Image (spheres, rainbow, N blue to C red):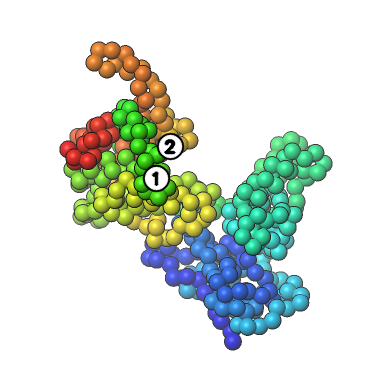
Amino acid sequence: MAIEIKAPTFPESVADGTVATWHKKPGEAVKRDELIVDIETDKVVIEVLAEADGVLAEIIKNEGDTVLSNELLGKLTEGGAAAAAPAAAPAAAAAPAQAAAPAAAAGDDAILSPAARKLAEENGIDPNSIAGTGKGGRVTKEDVVAAVEAKKNAPAAAAKPAAAPAAAAVVATGDRTEKRVPMTRLRAKIAERLVEAQSSMAMLTTFNEVDMTEVMALRSKYKDLFEKSHNGVRLGFMSFFVKAATEALKRFPAVNASIDGNDIVYHGYADIGVAVSSDRGLVVPVLRNAEQMSLAEIESGIATFGKKAKDGKLSIEEMTGGTFTITNGGTFGSMMSTPIVNPPQAAILGMHNIIQRPMAINGQVVIRPMMYLALSYDHRLIDGKEAVTFLVTIKNLLEDPARLLLEI
């Protein structure tokens, strides 16, 4: 019995996807719920799993092809026997050069995660030469990183890279090289939205600074008890900022609103997007109804998002929507920045690194852990007074965390 392998149903915010990686070749055996093909959208990589045991009979959409929601990708023969020579499959032979070349260079016999495959291709590493440490012998990103490091440390003669994929043209001119690679759909979407944000709104940024003494003291005093009481959930700084932001959003609803045509939409909830760095770029999963969440629930949610982002497991639903965003450039050492608003949201809060600086407190110079805050906002919707007062509210709540409990 032939089973159709179809692309998943994309939400309205996703127009189409691209076939990223086929993990099986025609003629190869497939187990039920085994990963067959990855579909890359401008938000996430979606894994398509086998519906039953069988054999991959035909590939209709090759790597690099654009696919629509529920479009046919290939066919699976349920309960069939694996072919002895899968290389003879016509669909694989008919793949375009730009898709076939990387497949030959990357070694499709190895089982790779999308992030590991991309890293291997970029560094000219043959995955078949890497011993996979993942489940079922899967080659993980860490395995590829180790192979790249080993390659760098090897003699120059042994470090000659494998044949470069057709999609990454390398031009050698003496000691100078250039490599041209196509943008991923995620990177292209990020670029599109950044340009859209700057061209479609009157964006302005206001700054302030916050003394982190009280938050740091509270965290230091209770972090062990917090972790023990909440089943291993660690107390970080981001939960304090999310709580402070949700409280400030209640007082300044325009900052939590959005523009829809000639209407202003005021949201009676706070869906907070938390920017997370991944191998594919910056992604912004959303904490739904964050105003109702405890510190432990916020920290648990953020930790889950971070792990999913690292593994490429974030779903489209987890990254859709949001009424306000928080981004933390301080994790990378940023002292100050002007974050760009994520449309149709009206504002974004930027956190930065904590620096011990001399401050004048009650006429005395003392050393305090200080952080610069930045609030970028759409001036069409938010007045300067509102933006400044909103940021001051967050500052006050963080400098006296008891205000968060008392809601004052």
Residue at figure coordinates x 67%, y 45% from the top left: 146
Outermost residue toward the right in this view: 157
Query: Can residue 51 be seen from the camera position used here?
Result: yes
- Residue 277 position, x and y percent, is 48, 45
Q: For numbered disc 1, what is the local secondary structure? A: helix
Kindly report which numbered mark, 1 or 2, lies closer to the viewer in this rendering.
1
Residue at figure coordinates x 34%, y 56% from the top left: 321
Residue at mark 2: 329
Label 1 CA crowd tier, 10 Å (few <14, some 14–19, many 20+): few
Residue type at mark 1: give it: Lys
Sequence-first disc among 1 and 2: 1
Label 2 CA crowd tier, 10 Å (few <14, some 14–19, many 20+): some
Residue type at mark 2: give it: Gly
Q: In the image, is residue 219 above or below residue 319?
A: above
- Residue 145 position, x and y percent, is 65, 46
Contact? badges 1 and 2 (CB < 8 Å): no
Q: In the image, is residue 384 above or below residue 363?
A: below
Asked whether, in this view, residue 130 is left or right of residue 284, the answer is: right
Residue at figure coordinates x 57%, y 75% from the top left: 32
Question: Considering the image in quadrants, where does the N terminus appear?
Answer: bottom right
Q: For numbered disc 2, what is the local secondary structure? A: helix
Q: In the image, is residue 83 above or below residue 148?
A: below
Residue at mark 1: 228
